[in-house]
Image (cartoon, rainbow, N blue to C red):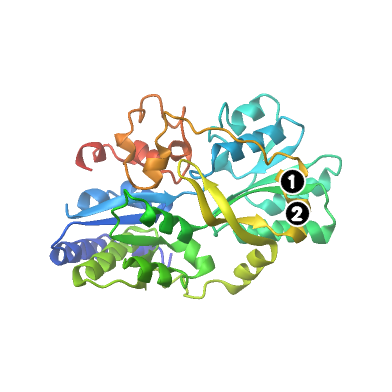
Amino acid sequence: MKYLSEYRNLEATKSYLKLIENTITEPWKIMEVCGGQTHGLVKNGILDLLPNKVQMIHGPGCPVCVTPLNLIDKAIELLENDVIVCSFGDMIRVPGSKKSLLETKANGGDLRILYSPLEAVKIAKENPDKEVVFFAVGFETTAPANALSVLHAQKEGVKNYSILVSHVLVPPAMEAILDDKFSNIDAFLGAGHVCAIMGYKEYHPLSEKYKIPIVITGFEPLDLVQGIYMAVNQLEKGIYRVENQYARVVKEEGNKAAIDVIQKVFEIGNREWRGIGEIPNSGYKLTKEFKDFDAEIKFGISNIRVPENSDCIAGEILKGIKKPHQCSQFGKTCTPSNPLGAPMVSSEGACAAYYHFSDNLITTS
């Protein structure tokens, strides 16, 4: 497939690995923001092929992983009270404070696993006597589809549809990481799929403020290695700017139609991140015009608050302070079949990547 198979080319990937080796003279810590990038690095063995002076730090780039316990408990509360709850599949096994959505479904809750929020609007239209809630989780990437579902429900007069919003934004999280006193990040690999929607104009001030290179990359082996080389090249030259490795997909201005839909339905507000806490202006919430579609308001569940699991170090992993195998529970009490936290069960979680793909990383990283 054009623009995909060539980015899995072994010889081209090796050539960039050689370039990195020939360029690097100092140790550098580079954080890949997205969980898809983490899986690409681990699954393809890239972490073992990089020079020892390059240390990849795994960032918070998995929206499922950063969804706080209280939001999962809110979804469970709805499910236990005769509401049809619809969700993408990667959310259903993430543990809440006592159980997961899947366990609640096993106890009789009407949980529907969907590929699109528009399917949830259809379910609401077909079941006018039932309330239907879509668990709207994601970074900026999934926000257009979730916003579109609200616009569609409004147009169709579907009043028994609402969304439980858990949208988080990448740039404020990057800034929070850089402001953390334990942060020692030298450069970022920006999330290509997020930038495909939003563009990367807002990364320029971030790069300038913190004097740090930001390279937008894709997810294939060549994407990742080329992006690492571009970051190392900047660091070695003592410069910092935003570069776009993923130019075949990402444009600086982003996708205007998608941004327009987002801005029509959502506004920016504070958002809690699992294991990290509240980050100012780091998420979307529905505007006043669409408050009738806000499940938290509609069902009076905004006051649900629960503490994080003290045995799970998801926060330290998501901030890049620790690696998954440095958790005392990793592979023991915490496994994909019995996860303590979202990074072990999510398809983009760092803990899941290490568990499934990194037999030798536990001794080498």
Amino acid marked by disc 1: Ile
For the point 61% across and 33% down, the residue is 101
From this view, report whether residue 317 is shown above or below residue 193. Answer: above
From this view, report whether residue 279 is shown above or below residue 190. Answer: above
**Residue 354 location (% of width, % of height):** 34, 40
In-front residue for pair 8/178:
178
From this view, report whether residue 337 is shown above or below residue 143. Answer: above
Report which residue position mark 1 lands on: 297
Q: Is residue 56 visible?
A: yes
Could you say which quadrant of the image residue 321 lies in? top left
**Residue 196 location (% of width, % of height):** 50, 67
Report which residue position mark 2 lands on: 291
- Given contact means CB atoms under 8 Å apart, are the residues at marks 2 and 1 in contact? yes
Q: Is residue 245 visible?
A: no
* Earlier-in-chain disc, 2 versus 1: 2
User: Element at badge 2?
Assistant: helix
**Residue 324 location (% of width, % of height):** 34, 38
For the point 25% across and 50% down, the residue is 47
Amino acid marked by disc 2: Lys
